[in-house]
């Protein structure tokens, strides 16, 4: 797993690699660096954790399929709710120019001899997902180090977020590394110790 941590409004970007094949997660900044990291590799697709513009800015710059949860399709192209207008970021991609692949909970995406498993984790948006590969979990804006994603945007839900957190912790052992959409990398073990939302929503229930 290669990580491009963002210091701006854009999200963290990740590259899931296996031999010469790679999936790109939430490409949103540092196009030149991503392009260099992809040299000599076969880009199999882009995986989106959700459709907010700070996670999708660069998706039109790569010629490959784009994977998105089926409940997130409307948000991806609606600039009034995807953050484009709020952040002042122009959306440069169009539905007609993207090779969209709709996914759902339990979808398996093959990567050579590994499998990337989709976990539907609504709460931040209706179609938010996490991607699990081995003991790595890309959590988007669902679970952060010491916190969770906002639930007050269109499609957000505190109730759904609670259920998604329970799902993440129920299906992940303590060794699993968390790769969030913003801020630093963490582990399930650390979040079970310090994340207040785990402590009050999951542990106490």
Image (cartoon, rainbow, N blue to C red):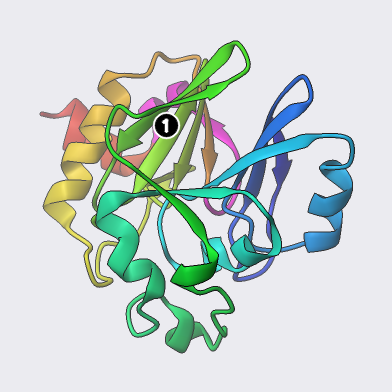
Q: Is residue 99 magenta?
A: no
In the figure, is residue 163 to the left or right of 62? left
For this rendering, which residue is in front, 20 or 174?
A: 20
Which quarter of the figure is the N terminus placed in? top right
Q: What residue is at 59 percent from the left and 38 percent from the top?
A: 185
Number of numbered tags placed on the structure image: 1
Q: Is residue 188 magenta?
A: yes
Label 1: few (<14), some (14–19) or many (≥20) C-alpha neighbours in 10 Å? many
Residue lying farthest front? 96
Q: What residue is at 40 percent from the left and 55 percent from the top?
A: 50
Instruction: Identify residue for label 1.
Output: 191
| Residue 162 can be seen in this image | yes
In the figure, is residue 35 to the left or right of 205? right
Give the x, y percent position of residue 165: 26, 37
Give the x, y percent position of residue 88: 54, 89
Chain part drawn in magenta: 181-194
For this rendering, which residue is in front, 56 or 195?
A: 56
156 relative to 23, above or below: below
For this rendering, which residue is in front, 139 or 33?
A: 33
Give the x, y percent position of residue 63: 67, 54
- Which SS class for mark 1? helix
């Amino acid at each position: 797993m290669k990580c491009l941590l963002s210091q701006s409004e854009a999200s963290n970007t990740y590259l899931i690699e296996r031999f010469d094949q790679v999936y790109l997660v939430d490409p949103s900044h540092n196009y030149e660096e991503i392009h260099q990291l992809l040299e000599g590799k076969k880009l199999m697709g882009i995986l989106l954790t959700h459709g907010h513009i700070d996670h999708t800015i660069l998706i039109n710059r790569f010629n490959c399929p784009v994977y998105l949860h089926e409940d997130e399709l409307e948000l991806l192209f609606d600039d009034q709710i995807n953050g484009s207008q709020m952040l002042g970021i122009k959306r440069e991609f169009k539905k007609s120019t993207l090779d969209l692949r709709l996914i759902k909970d339990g979808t398996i995406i093959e990567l050579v001899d590994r499998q990337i498993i989709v976990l539907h984790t609504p709460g931040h948006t209706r179609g938010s997902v996490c991607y699990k590969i081995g003991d790595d979990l890309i959590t988007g804006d669902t679970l952060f180090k010491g916190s969770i994603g906002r639930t007050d945007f269109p499609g957000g839900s505190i109730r759904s977020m609670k259920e998604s957190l329970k799902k993440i912790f129920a299906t992940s052992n303590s060794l699993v590394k968390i790769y969030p959409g913003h801020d630093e990398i963490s582990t399930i073990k650390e979040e079970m110790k310090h994340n207040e939302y785990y402590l009050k929503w999951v542990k106490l229930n």
